[in-house]
Image (tube, helix red, strand yellow):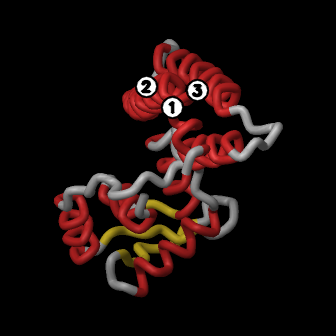
């Protein structure tokens, strides 16, 4: 995820200071890793440096002084260009679950006593199902907003795809382990 473009998108909704933009991010992307304040302020400084945002002013309202930022015309143009780019599907599998399954199969084929791919897949499947129950509860909770529902649906679809892959892999474990062992 491009923090630069996400912040430009949040600024498209109106000017804001770093704390406000972080709060908006965490509300709009509830299943994403929360942004660190340092990351928000560093990115805002770069946006200003690059002419994509500008300082609108400062305010204090009885507390610490806060700098308000707004997107420039150049920032809006860059945001439009980024939105128009199609994100290419990942060319390679770079998933920790995939890597652990492959390594566990290799270790089991080599006779490693602690390597049990079926047990690992079963435990991972249980963790996925638990997370799916949590996400379903979040999205069906009274008052769940659209960002929460969309984010939960996205995460659920990915978890479901992982579960299907785990089921297929579990069915192939014996032949996979035999194939690796004979290589």
The residue wearing badge 1 is 175
Q: Earlier in the sequence, mark 3 or mark 2?
A: 3
Label 2 environment density (alpha carbons within 10 Å; few <14, some 14–19, many ≥20): few
Q: Is residue 143 visible?
A: yes
Q: CA distance from mark 3 to mark 2?
A: 11 Å
Q: Which residue is mark 2?
A: 164
Q: Residues within 10 Å of mark 3 (few under 14, many from 20)?
A: some
Image point 39% across, 58% down: which residue? 6
Give the x, y percent position of residue 33.
57, 49
Dot label at residue 128 = 3
Point out residue 87 in the picture as x, y percentages from the top left corner.
26, 56
Q: For this rendering, which residue is in front, 89 or 22?
A: 89
Assign a secondary structure to mark 3. Answer: helix
Local crowd size for mark 1, using a 10 Å CA cut-off: few (<14), some (14–19), many (≥20):
few
Task: Looking at the picture, tell me which residue is in the foreground, 126 or 149.
Answer: 126
Q: Is residue 84 above or below residue 169?
A: below
Instruction: Give the residue at x 41% y 63%.
Output: 2
Q: Secondary structure at mark 2?
A: helix
N-term-proximal mark, 2 vs 1: 2
Q: Position of residue 35 (x, y in %)?
A: 58, 56
Where residue 102 appears, x then y in whole percent? 58, 45
Image quarter of residue 97: top right
Count numbered badges in the picture: 3
| Residue 28 located left or right of residue 90 | right
The residue shown at (45%, 31%) is 165
Identified at 41% across, 77% down, the residue is 47
């Amino acid at each position: 995820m491009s923090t630069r473009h996400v912040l430009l998108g949040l600024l498209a909704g109106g000017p804001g200071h770093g704390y406000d933009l972080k709060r908006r991010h965490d509300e709009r992307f509830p299943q994403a890793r929360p942004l660190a304040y340092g990351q928000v302020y560093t990115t805002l400084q770069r946006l200003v440096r690059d002419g994509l945002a500008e300082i609108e002013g400062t305010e204090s309202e009885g507390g610490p002084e806060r700098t308000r930022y707004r997107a420039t015309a150049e920032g809006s143009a860059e945001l439009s260009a980024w939105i128009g780019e199609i994100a290419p599907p990942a060319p390679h599998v770079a998933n920790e679950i995939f890597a652990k399954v492959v390594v566990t199969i290799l270790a089991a084929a080599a006779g490693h006593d602690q390597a049990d791919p079926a047990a690992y897949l079963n435990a991972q499947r249980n963790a996925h199902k638990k997370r799916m129950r949590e996400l379903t509860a979040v999205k069906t909770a009274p008052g769940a907003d659209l960002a929460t529902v969309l984010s939960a649906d996205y995460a659920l679809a990915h978890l479901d795809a992982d579960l299907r892959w785990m089921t297929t892999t579990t069915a192939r474990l014996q032949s996979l382990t035999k194939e690796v062992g004979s290589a």
